[in-house]
Amino acid sequence: MAAARATLPDLRALDPKALKALIVAQHTELLSHKNEIEHLQLLIAKLRRMMFGRSSEKISHQIEQLELQLEELETAKSGRVASAPTAPVAESELKQSRRVFPDHLPRQIETHLPSQATCTECGGALRKLGEDVSEVLEYVPESFKVIRHVRPKFSCSGCEHIAQAAAPTRPIERGIAGPGLLAHVLVSKYADHLPLYRQSEMYARQGIELDRSTLADWVGNTSHLLQPLVNSVREHVMAATKIHADDTPVPVLAPGQGKTKLARLWTYVRDDRPAGDKTPPAVWFAYSPDRKGEHPKQHLNKFAGILQADGYAGFHHLYQGGKIVEAACWAHVRRKFYDLHVAHASPVAAEAIERIGALYATEKEIRGRPAEERCAIRQSRVRPMLDELHTWLEKQLHHLSRKSEVAAAIRYALARWRALLRYLDGGRIEIDNNSAERALRCVALGRKNYLFAGSMRAETAPHLSTP
């Protein structure tokens, strides 16, 4: 403060014009500092959300500890109940507490007959009066079995010709794994996110020695077998008139460097179920060593229609020529205002979130209805709300500093306004790109377990999924 006073000129000696100039300069500097503080607060909030900072880790740890305590208390309670003297339970009470298990589960019937075939009171013959039925849920551990293929040889007594059935084909030539085992390994790896070394340990507990390298060889060969199916899934996805697209980073080990580099896994989703369409949904994944725009251009070279995606610059050249039309994502717009609201409780951000929430309330109401009905409701009810939102955003922009984070969020929305309105004109178009983000959740779960991919070939293996 002393240094500031030393450099401050004598205000009494300044003329009104110089005094006004000084006030404007000080006000500009204060605004700059305020905007910088807002930017840093927002950046910190984003990083905390993205990187799961210490505070959230501490909360997660506390929750885990509470769950363990609850588990111990419940276990102790069950132990005390089990050791306490039990009173006879009426059959009516048993029927009330009995749980009904799904019909698709196989039933093993065990009939329990009285220990004696005659009456214990008088020795008379017993006749069936009825029966009581109760069910217990049991678990049968997964097990291996060996299928032995026997091919007898026969010789002709006349010409000595030898006859023998051809050897049955195998999924992998000279491989020891059957199709069921191969499917289990792939589902465990890609759907249940179990790395191969963990699977190897699980099989070893059952006395089956399957090295990780052997399992990796099976995955590679099965991926080659599945390539025609992957091609069919891609054709099915690209035949749609509207698809969702997104990408996510995947760490891949850089050969000879001892460290990883960031590659990308792209997802393209066909899913028109929210518009009442019965066409089967599907997801096609594609790998690229980087995030250059040439990759989605190659992936979508045969697609024509609506592309729902985020504001990634690599998509922009796809919209030239009109073959592919952009539909922007309202979830990304809302997320920017939400980050601002969390960082410093901006009233403008709060109102923007509330207005966008009204759009989503209508979408929730019309989800699953036919496309024509969805389009009509959007035109009559949502378009006026969006017109008001556009006017309100422009008005707020005039009252905000150009360098403020709220102004940047507003400019982000206004710059994409035409693409954000696209969903009004087509009942099949969604309000956001959440279908693609949901499809990438499996990648995020696997990434936590794998940490990184061992090679580029591991990521170029076919990926199949349904949303």
Image: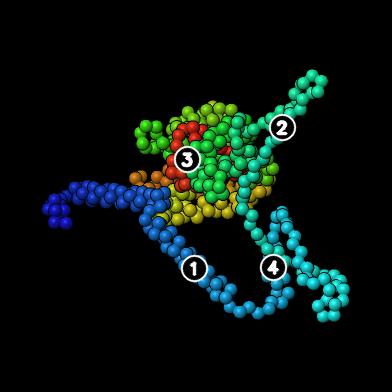
The CA span between labels 2 and 4 is: 51 Å
Mark found first going from the N terminus, 3 or 2: 2
Mark found first going from the N terminus, 2 or 4: 4
Residue 80 position, x and y percent, is: 55, 75
Residue occupying image coordinates x 53% and y 69%: 75
Disc 2 vs disc 1: Cβ atoms closer than 8 Å? Answer: no
Three-letter code, disc 3: Thr
Q: Which quarter of the figure is the C terminus placed in?
A: top right
Three-letter code, disc 1: Glu
The disc placed on residue 72 is 1
Residue 240 position, x and y percent, is: 63, 35
Q: Count neighbours of disc 4 (C-alpha within 10 A) and say few if under 14, some if 14 to 19, many if 20 or more.
A: few
The disc placed on residue 248 is 3
Mark found first going from the N terminus, 1 or 3: 1
The residue tagged with tag 2: helix, strand or loop?
Answer: loop
Tell me if residue 332 can be seen: no
- Residue on which the image places disc 2: 151
The residue tagged with tag 4: helix, strand or loop?
Answer: loop
Q: Is residue 340 left or right of residue 140?
A: left
